């Protein structure tokens, strides 16, 4: 941990300018006061929290993701770089999806192996030659970014299906502003609270041409038992749109309607938080009760917009990830602004040989795993686990990629009555509408609360922080 | 051969269904061995039939009916002129490279038993891809007995294979799972089969498979009859498995106690004298 | 609004109302069974409680005998009885949770708080005292829920559907009490019975919290036909069938006006109210109290079904 980049102290211990105010403030505060604020934060979370906890069962305490009161701060120039990089990347992703489900130029050019696309379960044949309104596939992307140095940001993962977490971005800021008004007076922090408006504007902009002037947008949730239900309900509330379940919608004459007390009302845009597989029992899993029978047929007829589009998994699949720099170059003829984590593709013999030789240094990931499962972290794994993984990789090399263990940047974090550096990542949310890309300045910073841990996933003991982008 | 098909599906509900929505894949398209002379679909409900084309080029008809009803009839009827092409299927709509048909699906996942079965067939014909598929069609025929009792539309290849019994759908799924495990792109075909024994009434349509052979293209095999498809076959829809080619996929709301009746007639049409 | 949202609101109201009603029945039964036998006769009041709750059949499928323990358990706590108090609260909360944003936070706090509190009573209370506390708690929950709805909800369709649920359920409950006890309410000349009935009459009034109201309205000692009049036709008495139907018609009309369209639900509600307002008590007795009530229960159910079909599906 000694040789990783700390966002407050850099690598040499000098306080970086963006953190100067925070550093002074932290030194002024007594540990007792911070402890007290932590408790207040916890209480507030439980209260707003109550809005959240409502949806968790009786043991709602489990649902509270730990919140760290020390903000993560990005300077305006750092953010400018990220913003350009994210815009570029998401533009390329949308062009790539249009191409993959259309002319397939990138396959013809031999840049991505054909089998990686067509034999991939996340490639949806149903989307082939399907026109989507305004050529936008990924309306909401959550791009996971890690930092390894003052100017080096890597994209770790492109979440292009139904990324979640934005409610934490919004709530974390609410809580911070309530708890530390004086800290906000020392800094000019760019606001994030306009995210719901930006999202609604984005969704309305991509309504099909057949929609009314003021399109009807709804949020489709799998229902109260889904782990992200509170976010669905929270967003629907903030956007002022109906939160619907599959059974609230019906398809008639190729048009989607919602059942209201005043009769069927036409739906133009569906912000869906239901996975492809469950969207329409007539097109995908026939046993799905979460979906809307006939939805795909209406979608194909261009009568409704799904956000995100069906089949976007073929953009954020781990197998495709390593080709993202080539994808950016191919469609935009530009050098990628944000780099990929160097990745070895075990499907390629040369890479495979290297990976098998360096298993104890690398992070090996299953191409179709997620959330930190199905993963080997070489440096911390014992011999038995490495050997077991070697067998698995050799049996099916195509299913694995490997990356170096990254020295993720750290950020001061409040732990047991003291400030200590902990590893962090960042998930900004990128909105793509009819003609614009919108990114609110900030995102969800996840922090690995265990000392030395690199795993920030909330399912494995990660917490969150408020993310500040400085305005000047 | 000129084949005349009529396929009547009747649903009856003890208590009326308040809403029915269905997608039909019941309309054949022409290819080199098949010319569609006439074809029509008739649904008893008062509703609009929307015609679309699915991912694999199958013609689909969708409709929804909101008038509470205690029965629903779907009638397809038509005539198709067919030619024996020795199983070769050419002139079809191909939207994807054959390798797409290597994807496994829930219904066609090969379990260890199928893997071993496929391996044994392959080992017997090490050199020739076509011979290997002929071997496979005979082996599936020999291994899985035709029996309408033990399986249902959601039975998987591995379940049918362990039962050693099933209908044409199950035999096709077993064939597909085995062929894909050997690296042969393979797909499911739904359609009709004309019986040479003069019996025209059937309880259902038929199902077989198409496998992709380098240099030859798609070749149709029928594991239920251990042979290649001939001019007795009317090809209607293809998919990765039954679900992709199912003649009907639908949902109803309400309508308890559904009974389903299917009457299929496949006969030879008399040639009309052209004037 | 979404039909499902309206449906949830309608059912939250019904379940809370039903829980309240069950608690009242149980409380009244406890009171009756505490009296010396000489005052109440040898009727099995626990059996009658089950009948009044409308679940005789399912009760006897589960228990051999209607004694205090069995009935308390079945009506209050049993998870096997879909209409037990605990299940009603549970279902009310499930419905509330699904429409969390359509309820005010006050209403949510009441129902969620009650649901959490219920866990404390989870092991059926042993003593009568403790059980009585439980019944009071259920009634208070319903009062607080109703009160917070009254004080905090916007008067829009959400409120009206909520109120429709309340009133349909309330009318059904009142009718069921009458259905079980109608033999006690027949006019004097046809009535076989004696002073024993006094306590039964008082119990009926208590179960709809109308004992005091009775005296204010009639200024008489308890007379069975007056009790029937109070519970059926008196529009001033909040739990009477007539009062429930005044409300049902009003809320149905509010909805129709807001939507600019009326339908079968409005016609049905008006039809039933018209009948109630044109009837006199002697006419009801003449044509048969029992028949009247049976018909009312089925009419009321039908209105519930009509509302569902018109708005909630």
Image: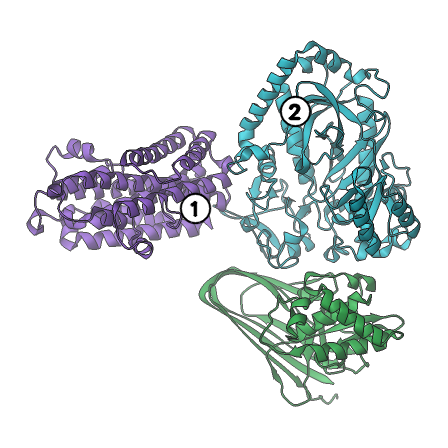
Residue B158: image quadrant is bottom right
Q: A121 above or below B270?
A: above
Chain letter for mark 2, please: A
- Give the residue at mark 2: A173
Chain A rendering hue: cyan
Examine the rendering and report whether any part of residue A72 can be seen: yes
- Give the residue at mark 1: C261
Q: SS for tag 2? A: helix
Question: Residue furthest toward the left?
Answer: C189
Evaluate if marks 1 and 2 touch, with contact meaning CB atoms under 8 Å apart: no
Q: Position of residue B144 (x, y in %)?
A: 68, 77
Q: Position of residue A360 (x, y in %)?
A: 85, 41
Residue at x 43%, y 43% (from the top left corner): C91
Q: Is residue A280 left or right of residue A378?
A: left
Q: How much space separates mark 1 and mark 2, taking CA atoms?
A: 45 Å
Of circles 1 and 2, which is in front? Answer: 2
């Amino acid at each position: 941990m000694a040789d990783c980049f700390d966002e407050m102290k850099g690598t040499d211990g000098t306080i970086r300018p963006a953190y100067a105010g925070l550093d002074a403030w932290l030194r002024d505060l007594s540990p007792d006061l911070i402890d007290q604020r932590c408790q207040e934060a916890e209480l507030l979370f439980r209260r707003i929290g109550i809005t959240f906890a409502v949806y968790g069962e009786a043991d709602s305490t489990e649902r509270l993701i730990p919140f760290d009161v020390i903000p993560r701060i990005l300077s305006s120039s750092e953010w400018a770089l990220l913003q350009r990089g994210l815009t570029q990347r998401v533009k390329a992703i949308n062009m790539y999806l249009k191409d993959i489900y259309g002319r397939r130029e990138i396959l013809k050019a031999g840049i991505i192996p054909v089998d990686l696309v067509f034999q991939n379960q996340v490639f949806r044949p149903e989307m082939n030659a399907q026109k989507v309104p305004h050529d936008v596939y990924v309306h909401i992307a959550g791009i996971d970014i890690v930092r390894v140095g003052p100017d080096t940001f890597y994209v770790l993962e492109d979440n292009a299906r139904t990324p979640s977490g934005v409610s934490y971005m919004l709530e974390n800021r609410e809580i911070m502003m309530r708890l530390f008004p004086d800290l906000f007076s020392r800094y000019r922090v760019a606001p994030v609270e306009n995210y719901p408006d930006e999202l609604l504007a984005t969704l309305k902009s991509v309504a099909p041409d057949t929609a009314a002037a003021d399109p009807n947008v709804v949020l489709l949730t799998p229902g109260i038992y889904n782990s992200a239900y509170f976010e669905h309900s929270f967003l629907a509330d903030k956007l002022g749109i109906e939160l619907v379940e599959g059974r609230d919608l019906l398809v008639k004459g190729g048009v989607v309607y919602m059942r209201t007390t005043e009769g069927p009302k036409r739906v133009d845009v569906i912000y869906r938080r239901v996975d492809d597989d469950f969207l329409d029992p007539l097109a995908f899993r026939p046993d799905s009760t979460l979906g809307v029978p006939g939805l795909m047929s209406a979608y194909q007829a261009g009568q409704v917009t799904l956000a995100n589009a069906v089949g976007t998994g073929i953009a954020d699949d781990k197998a495709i990830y390593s080709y993202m720099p080539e994808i950016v170059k191919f469609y935009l003829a530009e050098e990628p602004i944000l780099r990929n984590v160097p990745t070895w593709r075990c499907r390629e013999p040369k890479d495979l040989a290297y990976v098998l030789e360096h298993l104890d240094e690398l992070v090996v990931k299953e191409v179709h795993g997620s959330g930190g499962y199905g993963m080997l972290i070489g440096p911390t794994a014992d011999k038995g686990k490495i050997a077991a993984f070697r067998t698995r990789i050799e049996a099916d090399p195509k299913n694995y990629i490997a990356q170096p263990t990254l020295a993720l940047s750290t950020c001061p974090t409040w732990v047991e009555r003291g400030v200590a550096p902990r590893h962090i990542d960042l998930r900004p949310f990128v909105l793509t509408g009819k003609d614009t890309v919108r990114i609110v300045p900030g995102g969800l910073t996840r922090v690995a609360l265990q000392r030395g841990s690199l795993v920030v996933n909330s399912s494995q003991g990660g917490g969150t922080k408020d993310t500040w982008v400085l305005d000047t | 051969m000129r084949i005349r098909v009529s396929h009547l599906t009747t649903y009856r509900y003890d208590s009326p269904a308040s809403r029915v929505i269905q997608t039909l894949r019941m309309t054949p398209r022409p290819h080199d061995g098949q010319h569609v002379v006439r074809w029509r679909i008739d649904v008893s409900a008062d509703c609009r039939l929307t015609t679309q084309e699915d991912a694999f080029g199958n013609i689909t008809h969708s409709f929804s009916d909101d008038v509470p009803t205690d029965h629903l009839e779907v009638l397809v009827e038509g005539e198709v002129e067919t030619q024996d092409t020795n199983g070769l299927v050419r002139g079809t709509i191909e939207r994807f490279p054959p390798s797409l048909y290597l994807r496994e699906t829930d219904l066609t996942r090969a379990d260890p038993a199928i893997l071993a079965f496929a391996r044994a067939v392959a080992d017997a014909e090490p050199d020739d891809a076509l011979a290997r598929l002929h071997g496979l069609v005979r082996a599936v025929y020999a291994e899985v007995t035709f029996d309408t009792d033990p399986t249902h539309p959601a039975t998987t290849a591995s379940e049918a294979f362990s039962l050693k019994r099933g209908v044409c759908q199950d035999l096709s799924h077993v064939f597909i799972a085995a062929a894909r495990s050997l690296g042969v792109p393979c797909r499911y075909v739904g359609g009709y089969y004309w019986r040479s024994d003069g019996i025209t009434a059937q309880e259902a349509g038929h199902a077989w498979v198409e496998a992709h052979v380098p240099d030859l293209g798609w070749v149709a095999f029928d594991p239920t009859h251990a042979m290649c498809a001939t001019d007795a076959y009317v090809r209607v829809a293809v998919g990765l498995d039954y679900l992709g080619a199912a003649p009907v996929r639908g949902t109803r709301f309400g309508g308890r106690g559904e009974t389903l009746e299917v009457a299929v007639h496949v006969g030879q049409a008399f040639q009309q004298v052209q004037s | 609004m979404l039909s499902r949202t309206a449906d949830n609101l309608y059912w939250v109201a019904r379940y809370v109302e039903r829980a309240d009603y069950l608690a009242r029945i149980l409380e009244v039964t406890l009171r009756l069974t505490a009296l010396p036998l000489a005052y109440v006769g040898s009727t099995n009041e626990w059996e009658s409680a089950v009948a009044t709750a409308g679940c005789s059949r399912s009760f006897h499928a589960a228990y051999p005998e209607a004694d205090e323990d069995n009935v308390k358990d079945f009506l209050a706590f049993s998870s096997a009885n879909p209409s037990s108090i605990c299940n009603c609260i549970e279902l009310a909360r499930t419905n509330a949770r699904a429409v969390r944003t359509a309820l005010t936070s006050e209403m949510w706090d009441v129902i969620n708080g009650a649901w959490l509190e219920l866990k404390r009573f989870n092991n059926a209370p042993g003593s009568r005292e403790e059980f009585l506390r439980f019944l009071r708690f259920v009634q208070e929950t319903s009062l607080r829920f109703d009160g917070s709805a009254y004080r905090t909800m916007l008067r829009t369709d959400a409120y009206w559907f909520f109120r429709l649920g309340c009133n349909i359920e309330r009318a059904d409950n009142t009718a069921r009490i009458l259905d079980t006890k109608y033999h006690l309410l027949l006019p004097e000349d046809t009535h076989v019975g004696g002073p024993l009935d006094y306590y039964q009459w008082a119990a009926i009034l208590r179960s709809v919290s109308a004992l005091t109201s009775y005296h204010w309205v009639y200024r008489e000692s308890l007379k069975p036909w007056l009790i029937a009049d109070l519970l059926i036709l008196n529009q001033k008495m909040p739990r009477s069938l007539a009062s429930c139907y005044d409300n049902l018609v009003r809320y149905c009309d509010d909805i129709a006006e807001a939507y600019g369209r009326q339908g079968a639900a409005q016609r049905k509600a008006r039809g039933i109210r018209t009948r109630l307002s044109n009837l006199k008590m002697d006419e009801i007795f003449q044509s048969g109290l029992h028949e009247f009530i049976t018909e009312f229960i089925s009419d009321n159910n039908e209105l519930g079904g009509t509302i569902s079909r018109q708005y909630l599906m």
